[in-house]
Amino acid sequence: MLPGAGSTRLPIVTDDAQTRHAATLRVPAQHPALAGHFPGNPIVPGVMILDAVISAAQTWLGTGFQVRRLAYAKFLAPLRPEETAEIDLSLRAPRLEFAVHLGGTALAKGAFDCAGEPAT
């Protein structure tokens, strides 16, 4: 999912209302990645959570949005199949910060270093 070389311009953001975005994440119990992660006690793999964060950012900022690298990530609690988690995104160019939570429980947090073209 991490793109190769591209433009270094970030999406244009003009006010605080445009620097934050929220999305949801729900993984069905039948998803094939859950079968081996872990049998009898499935949890959503961290890579699936990161992929959902990137997808939410691309939906928000446009397909020109690109991730350069994962600056950091901490997984704090497991996400189980069929649970609906909230993804909170905050753009502080060139960094996209994220937090994933389920109710009042923090599941993950981190940041991506980004680049991209302005959304049209």
Image: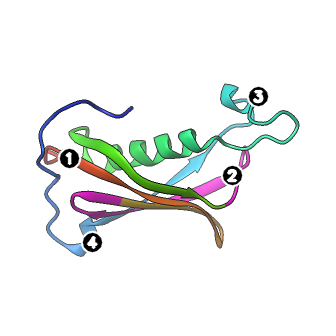
Q: How many marks?
A: 4
Element carrying mark 3: loop
Q: In this image, 116 relative to 58: left or right? A: left
**Residue underneath mark 2:** 79
Element carrying mark 2: loop
**Residue underneath mark 1:** 115
**What separation in Å lies between label 2 and label 3 (alpha carbons)?**
15 Å
Front position in the image: 105 or 103: 105
**What separation in Å lies between label 1 and label 2 (alpha carbons)?**
29 Å
- Farthest top residue in view: 32
Give whichever of discs 1 and 2 has the lower sequence position.
2
Asked whether the residues under the numbered discs 3 and 4 touch, taking CB atoms below 8 Å apart as contact, a structural biologist would say no
Give whichever of discs 4 and 2 has the lower sequence position.
4
**Residue underneath mark 4:** 17
Give whichever of discs 3 and 1 has the lower sequence position.
3
Question: What segment is highlighted magenta in the picture?
Answer: 77-96
The label number, if any, that marks residue 45 in the structure image: none
Residue at the image point whose x is 17% and y is 52% from the top: 11
Is 91 a magenta residue? yes
Element carrying mark 1: strand
Give whichever of discs 3 and 4 has the lower sequence position.
4
Q: Quadrant of residue 48?
A: top right
Element carrying mark 4: helix
In the image, residue 84 lies at what x, y percent? Answer: 64, 54
